[in-house]
Amino acid sequence: MEGTNPVNKKLAAALSGGAVLVLALSGCTGDDGNEELDAWAKQVCDELQVQARTIKAANAAIQKETSDNSTPAEVQKADSQAFQDIADAYKAIGTAITKAGPPNVEEGEKKQRDAVKELNTISASYTSLQKQVDALDTKDQGKFAAGLKDIAAEMKKLGKTGSDALKTLEEGEVGQAMAKQESCKSASASASPSAAQG
């Protein structure tokens, strides 16, 4: 099963880079005692923690199929499910931010709107990747490996783009309020150890 293994390893590497982009959260803590903002942050962080676990599990599933001597059909099935889970997770985070309403900060509405739009775009991108992986020919090893390579390249791009509005949302007071939430701390820590540095 050599043909797909190196490519699928690239896919796993690309995925783990892309899927943590929403979890670059925990800024450094600071407290101006904005109770309304703290309540907003708690609501968003609690959902974020749940979805971070989903994304982490999806990453792990792809990496498991890469390390095993899996057939193209098994790899396709695992990758397709993982992409769907990640797409759903980003959508759920967007929904949580919508439900929480705009954060109580300057330009809160714009920050909220931009972040939700971005999360939905990322979600749609993963849905598109799922369709691509579902369409791959698992009977032809070479074609399958080539198709996975294209998907890995797209994921790499996805990991590099699309986190600007989220970064903007997490700036300043919002980031400080989120950093205070236990659920955001553990979401960051579980996704990437370096993100927890404040």
Image: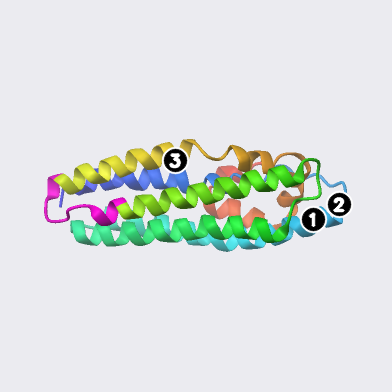
Earlier along the polypeptide chain: callout 3 or callout 1?
1
Provide residue 192's location: percent of width, then percent of height. Answer: 53, 47
Residue 104 falls left or right of residue 132: right
User: What's the magenta region?
Assistant: 132-142
Q: Earlier in the sequence, mark 2 or mark 3?
A: 2
| Residue underneath mark 3 | 158
The residue wearing badge 1 is: 38
- Dividing the image into 4 quarters, which one contains the C terminus? top right
137 within the magenta span: yes
Q: For this view, does 99 lie left or right of residue 136?
A: right
What amino acid does circle 2 point to? Asn
Secondary-structure class at tag 1: helix
Question: Circle 2 — which element?
Answer: loop
123 inside magenta stretch: no
- State if disc 2 and disc 1 touch (CB < 8 Å): yes
Query: Is disc 2 surrounded by few (<14), some (14 to 19) or many (20+) residues within 10 Å?
Result: some
Q: Read off the residue under disc 2.
A: 34
